[in-house]
């Protein structure tokens, strides 16, 4: 058993709260230190949002949540921590004071990341007792959902940090050279500046600017980024043609980036009023939930494509996947997962089609147990499901943790009959059952045939062992 690690979060605001949730929901214990008397409530609200969204990105068992504690002093928070994440306000004087106190009380081998959006490590390290211990770990809001982290600092330190972040499902990017605002915030700054000009000059409103992003290039960026997108825009000749065609525009007046509009009271009012008209009907917490639900749905769609953020999530699932059941003389625990947002329907519960997905995944586990795994399937043999009789017994809701218990009712020759019970893990409530019949097939002839070799031996042994079990209670009722 690996020992539970501890993260100390210094500053529990928007970003510190997000870090706390990311670590906790990946099984780390977390200690938060923040002078704000409201910190427990604020972190609690971020955590509530994270609990309903992050686990829903996973299609396998999620790690057991760690323990959360609020420290009475920074010294107490950092004392035994493995990772310390500074998320205090973006002011160098505050950060220097915080680092001095951290280093006076933390372990010398602890990793000390800073969430700074723009300061370089050399600036953060000024006057530090052990400069090499401090590095930039710049996240994106919401930290519990968005995977990328920019790491800037001493090579050996950021490599250790990368290993930790990989383990909590993130996408650490080690930045080659330090630079103000790292990589991503330089883009965000450019887009933000341009948007401010467009509003100031009366060209577009906040709503119109958001629409050109979310109905257009924002969706392209979320899955391919900038260069891959523009490569395609160059047509068959790719990037070279793209540059030949659009390169000259760089010297035309297509940008006001070299200048910054003054944030006068008048411009601030204009932007804030437009933003109120656009989004004022929702509270910030409501907007956070809308954003999170949309992000989960988009990231799950990318999972299906095994692309971009979806590829990362699939790799994380593969790491968290539980081992196949080995004891064949008792009901088989074939699946455990959380119900995600995109499985909900207009009735406010899990759509009926998703029960088919759950029972199909549980059936796959039995196939893999007997050796009918991807290699066997690649050899041209498999099982087809020919019937699923599903009974919907109780409603299944967003965020429910469920597991499936499976009994093999018949495993003889070509026939594999399974009985699945889908149970809510928190209160043991039976949610649905499925009587499922699978037939062994040749993928070449697309007809049924007897299983072969080890699969035949294992399926026969499984069938015999399971035939001695009493019928599941829900079948007898
Ligand atoms: N808000 C954002 O979109 C992002 C912010 N960041 C960076 O994260 C850091 C924190 O920003 P936010 O969370 O947005 O700010 P915030 O204002 O929401 O939170 C800052 C927290 O630090 C606390 N604090 C103040 N002095 C402290 C001290 N001496 N010790 C411990 N805590 C202290 C405050 O009480 C507050 O709760 C900044 O460096 C910022 O650049 C990074 C990525 C995105
Ligand atoms: C606005 N910001 C500079 C604080 C933004 C970031 O640092 C990253 C983000 O989440 O957009």
Image (cartoon, grey):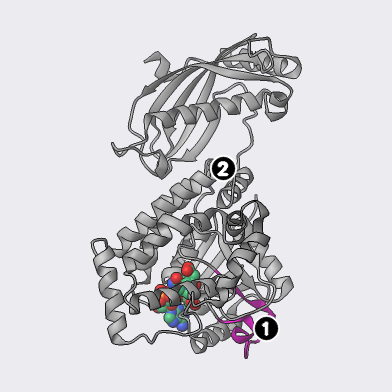
- Which residue shows up at 58% across the image and 52% down it? 308
Please tell me which of labels 1 and 2 falls first in the chain: 1
Q: Nearer the viewer, residue 86 or 373?
A: 373
Q: Secondary structure beneath disc 1?
A: loop
In the displayed structure image, the side of residue 430 where residue 280 appears, left or right: left
Is 304 situated above or below 391? below
Residue located beneath label 2 in the image: 305
Quadrant for the C terminus in the image: top left
Residue 123 magenta-highlighted: yes
Q: Nearer the viewer, residue 196 or 409?
A: 196
At which x and y percent is residue 13?
41, 72
At which x and y percent is residue 68?
46, 62
Q: Quadrant of ligand 1?
A: bottom left
In the displayed structure image, the side of residue 59 where residue 443 appears, left or right: right
- Which residue shows up at 28% across the image and 63% down it? 279
Q: Is residue 11 visible?
A: no
Residue lying at the far right of the rendered structure = 453
Which region of the structure is painted magenta? 119-138
Is 42 situated above or below 387? below
Q: Is residue 329 visible?
A: yes
Q: Nearer the viewer, residue 178 or 409?
A: 178
Tag of residue 130:
1
Is 380 situated above or below 210? above
At which x and y percent is residue 284?
31, 64
Crowd around label 2: few <14 · some 14–19 · many ≥20 (10 Å): few
- Which residue shows up at 49% across the image and 44% down it? 301
- The residues bearing labels 1 and 2 have C-alpha atoms spaced at a distance of 44 Å
- Which residue shows up at 72% across the image and 15% down it? 457
């Amino acid at each position: 058993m690996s020992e539970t690690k501890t993260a100390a979060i210094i500053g529990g605001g928007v970003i510190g709260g997000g870090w706390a949730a990311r670590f906790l929901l990946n099984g780390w214990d977390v200690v938060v230190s923040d002078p704000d008397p409201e910190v427990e409530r604020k972190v609690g609200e971020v955590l509530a949002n994270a609990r309903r969204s992050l686990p829903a990105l996973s299609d396998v068992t999620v790690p057991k949540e760690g323990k959360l504690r609020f420290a009475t002093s920074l010294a107490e928070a950092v004392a035994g921590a493995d990772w310390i994440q500074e998320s205090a306000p973006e002011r160098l004087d505050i950060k220097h004071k915080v680092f001095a106190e951290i280093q006076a009380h933390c372990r010398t081998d602890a990793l000390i990341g800073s969430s700074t959006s723009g300061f370089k490590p050399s600036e953060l390290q000024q006057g530090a007792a052990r400069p090499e211990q401090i590095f930039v770990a710049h996240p994106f809001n919401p930290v519990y959902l968005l995977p990328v982290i920019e790491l800037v600092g001493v090579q050996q330190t950021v490599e250790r940090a990368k290993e930790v972040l990989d383990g909590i499902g993130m996408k650490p990017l080690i930045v080659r050279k330090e630079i103000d605002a790292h990589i991503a915030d330089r883009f965000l700054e450019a887009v933000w500046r341009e948007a401010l000009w467009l509003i100031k000059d009366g060209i577009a409103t906040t709503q119109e600017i958001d629409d050109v992003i979310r109905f257009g290039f924002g969706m392209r960026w979320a899955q391919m980024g900038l260069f891959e997108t523009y490569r395609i825009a160059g047509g068959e000749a790719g990037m070279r043609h793209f540059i030949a065609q659009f390169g000259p525009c760089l010297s035309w007046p297509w940008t006001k980036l070299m200048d910054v509009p003054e944030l006068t009271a008048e411009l601030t009012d204009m932007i804030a009023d437009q933003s109120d008209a656009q989004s004022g009907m929702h509270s910030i917490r409501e907007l956070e939930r809308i954003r999170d639900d949309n992000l989960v749905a988009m990231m799950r769609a990318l999972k299906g494509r095994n692309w971009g953020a979806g590829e990362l999530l699939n790799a994380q699932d593969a790491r968290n996947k539980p081992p196949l059941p080995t004891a064949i003389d008792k009901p088989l625990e074939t699946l455990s997962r959380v119900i995600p947002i995109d499985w909900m329907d207009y009735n406010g519960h899990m759509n009926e089609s998703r029960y088919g997905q759950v029972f199909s995944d549980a059936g796959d586990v039995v196939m893999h147990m007997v050796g009918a795994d991807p290699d066997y399937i690649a050899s041209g043999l498999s099982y087809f499901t020919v019937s699923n009789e599903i009974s919907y017994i109780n409603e299944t809701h967003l965020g429910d943790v469920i597991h499936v218990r499976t009994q093999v009712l018949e495993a003889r020759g070509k026939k594999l009959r399974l009985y699945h019970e889908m149970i809510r893990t928190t209160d043991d409530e039976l949610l649905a059952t499925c009587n499922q019949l699978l037939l062994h097939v040749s993928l070449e002839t697309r007809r049924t045939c007897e299983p072969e070799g080890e699969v035949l031996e294992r399926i026969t042994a499984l069938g015999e062992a399971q035939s001695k079990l009493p019928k599941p209670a829900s079948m007898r009722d």
